[in-house]
Image (spheres, rainbow, N blue to C red):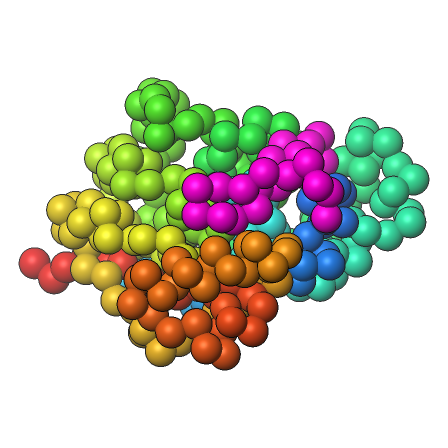
Amino acid sequence: MTGARTTTAAGKTRFDDIYNQPDPRAYFRTLAPLQYEIPHQAQDVFRRTLAQRSAVRGTGLPVTVLDLCCSYGINAALLNHDLTLEELYAHYTSDEAAALTRGELIESDKEFYASRRREDAVPVIGLDTAENATRYALEVGLLDEAYAENLERHPPSDELRRAVGRVGLITVTGGIGYITHHTFGALLDATRVPVWVSAFVLRTVPFTEILTVLDAHGLATETDPERTYPQRLFSDPGEQSSAVDQVLKAGDDPTGLEADGRYYTRLYQSRPRPA
């Protein structure tokens, strides 16, 4: 890992240099050694949740998904295509991919994803502050719409508000902590159809304020405190030490989890309370 990287207030390593590149090659090359796997953990969960949400809707029309902190559209790739995260790592870290210009990679990726598109693919809207990353995801066809907006600092644009009005499922894997209750409040204020939320949250990150916002918008949230999902290896001993401290402060036990060298998440599923 490069020594130039900084950490968050909670001691988590920042990877700002890979989040907004013109394409995802550096992202995958950097995170591969850390075994970043939370999109893989979320793949089947999001598909099951989407199927349940679609069944409740009962109209036969596809449910629109809003993926928060969507980055290069990885969750959309895994949701809507017959692909694994392991295959994406192999694809973007290959010598063949490294030899391509950005334009060549985009043309190659259009074919790569189109040939693997699932028949049950649904519209996916992406939200992320990283404009280059969201532009790539749009150009290769992973996202139907993308918005590079920071709802922690600014209200959503009119275009984003209109898009959120069509959303039936909000997903997030790696963003809680970077986004807070401010973002969730702004988005939920803009919803127009019953919305579900499926969120993977690091055990080091407080979720209480977001839960309060979800509750205020009529959503009941469930989680299994005994079920955890691995996110990635720690980048260095300092990051691990900080994570263990945060988990202990939250009243959780890091034994066998963070104490063994990885970040872990919990899954929070939110649905409208029965009338």
Q: In the picture shown, does residue 88 fall above or below 227? A: above
Q: Residue at x 24, y 37 (%)?
A: 185
**Which of the 4 quarters of the picture holds residue 9?**
top left
| Left or right of 153 on screen, residue 149 | right
Spot occupied by residue 151 in the image (x, y as percentages of width and height): 36, 29
Q: In the picture shown, does residue 103 fall above or below 203? A: above
Q: Residue at x 64, y 39 (%)?
A: 5
**Which of the 4 quarters of the picture holds residue 99?**
top right
In this view, the residue in front, 129 or 119, is 129
Q: Which residues are magenta?
A: 1-23
In this view, the residue in front, 249 or 208, is 249
Q: Residue at x 49, y 34 (%)?
A: 128
| Left or right of 231 on screen, residue 275 | left
Location of the C terminus by quadrant is: bottom left
In this view, the residue in front, 203 or 173, is 203
Is residue 74 visible in this depiction of the protein?
yes
Spot occupied by residue 248 in the image (x, y as percentages of width and height): 36, 66
In this view, the residue in front, 230 or 166, is 230
Is residue 203 visible in this depiction of the protein?
no
Q: Residue at x 58, y 38 (%)?
A: 6
Count of numbered marks: 0
- Residue 12 lies in the magenta-colored region: yes
- Of all residues shown, which one is farthest toward the left? 275
Q: In the picture shown, does residue 106 fall above or below 148? A: below
Spot occupied by residue 60 in the image (x, y as percentages of width and height): 37, 56
The secondary structure that dominates the magenta segment is loop
